[in-house]
Image (cartoon, rainbow, N blue to C red):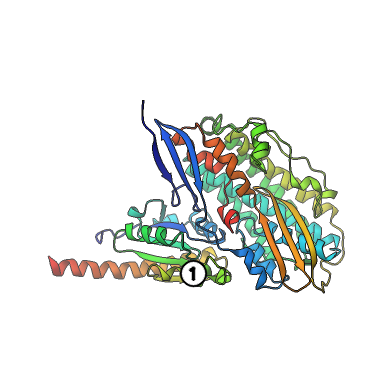
Amino acid sequence: MAYLKKSPWLIHYDASSCNGCDIEVLACLTPLYDVERFGIINTGNPKHADVFVITGSINDLNREVVKNIYEQMPNPKVVVAVGICACSGGVFAECYNVSGGVDQVIPVDVYVPGCAARPESIIDGIVKALGILEEKRAKMTEMEAVHA
Amino acid sequence: MSKEVVIPFGPQHPVLPEPIHLDLVIEDEKVKQAIPSIGYVHRGLETLVEKREYPEYVYLAERICGICSFIHGATYCQGVEAVMNVEVPERALFLRTIWSEYSRLHSHLLWLGLAADGFGFENLFMDAWRLRESILDELEATTGGRVIQGSCKVGGVRRDIDSETLDEMVSRLEGLRGELSDLADVFLNDSSVKGRMKNVGILPAKEAYDYGAVGPTLRGSGVSSDARMIGYAAYGKIHFTPVTEDGCDCYSRCAVRAKEMFASIDIIKEAVQKIPDGPIEVKVTGKPEGEYFSRAEQPRGEVIHYVKGNGTRHLARHRVRTPTLTNIPPLVKMLEGCELADVPVIVLSIDPCIGCAER
């Protein structure tokens, strides 16, 4: 998928967040912040997504779900962990059903801390992730050229 | 005869901002049975009472859910205050009422948006969320937080709002009323919205009651039940009647929420008129001993916080019964016999808040 350049689509999954960050992720898409003007669309289909926005921490039940969504996404792809729970477990780190941040299961490219993360910082994180996506894409194109 | 097929719905699904899993047993296009399984966002928050002292735990109680955050915090405080026999100043109770109603407004607007998105009305979704931002602005200006406010504490509230600001807030809400009624008008009168929601997901009054539905799910079936009527915080001093609808379908539940927004504005207006001067908190010392069931009305229905103190700084037990959890059995009932294509609308019609339900 390295030939696709514009309009990065994102998929959002709530691992075990309290909703706070999830509604802020959605708020980014709506008129006040409106990231859709940059061509960013929230899709429900992992196979259409370039950016994986994940909120909340990992537990035993959602471990496989998160892995599954990540594996279904085509390369190049980036992962943005939104909220302190997705980064480290946050206030819930001591809970018995929280095993920690998202990076235990899948590689994370950008960490956006905050409880709840503000839309401004989420947008900032996603913009950083787009830079990383661009680098990954360049590397892929290079590899393709070598193999061709 | 066609044979039965099981279709999984969730945990990751386009209409669900949060994970819930339903196994739908389908025959032709009809749902014969829906089997829910939950636990994807379970954290085990209630056990943290052993690690956090009771005044600190307010922050965690708020983080049960990011949508109903303020009301969770306030209900928890209410419970601890009752256990410790703390007399909370009037002004604090009125401020809690005002913030609770702002939370309800933002939650209902959020739901109306998600419902519109659920039945494919993208523009309406954006419009609802645009209006929601002005409510969040008020919350941010008065408490410091957009979705997690942290302005409630055991013994009162952390911040005061001066009377000038309160008057300005009311006048801004009055200005918003027109825009809100334009929005509500689409949900209540648009023929395609009606076509999508009328006679879908029927839940007769008796069944709603027997299965333990709460909040707009119950009031949409014509049962007038609202925890605000018990008069906690300042609700006892405010004139208010619960909004009910008799349709027993998704449309009625939507109408209840749309009309409750205006009821909330009226409550805020009356609370601002009646708010007394005085302190906003009392100093709380000592250790809670005893138990209490604290009840409050959330945007999704009645929530119960059970707190039990054992004479130490740590509570012995904190247990929450959230509205979404009690609304799942009625949801399973509604899904029986519905069309597969109606499942997203019906699931959304109970306003599922899985973060609350699983904690």
Looking at the picture, how far across and down is residue B315, in whole percent? Answer: 72, 68
Looking at the picture, how far across and down is residue A11, in whole percent? Answer: 41, 56
Instruction: Using the rendered view, name the quadrant where residue B262 is placed.
Output: top right
Residue at x-position 77% and y-position 60%: B79
Q: In the rendered image, which quarter contains the C terminus of chain B?
A: bottom right
Instruction: Using the rendered view, name the quadrant where residue A94 is placed.
Output: bottom right
| Mark 1 chain | A
Looking at the picture, how far across and down is residue B248, in whole percent? Answer: 62, 32
Above or below B58: residue B176: above
Please name the residue that numbered disc 1 is placed on.
A99
Q: Determine if residue B118 is in view.
A: yes
The residue nearer to you, when weighing A143 against A86, is A86
User: Is B207 displayed left or right of B194 in the figure?
Assistant: right
Q: Classify mark 1: helix, strand or loop.
A: loop
**Which residue is most to the left?**
A148
Q: Which amino acid does label 1 sit on?
A: Ser
Above or below B331: residue B171: below
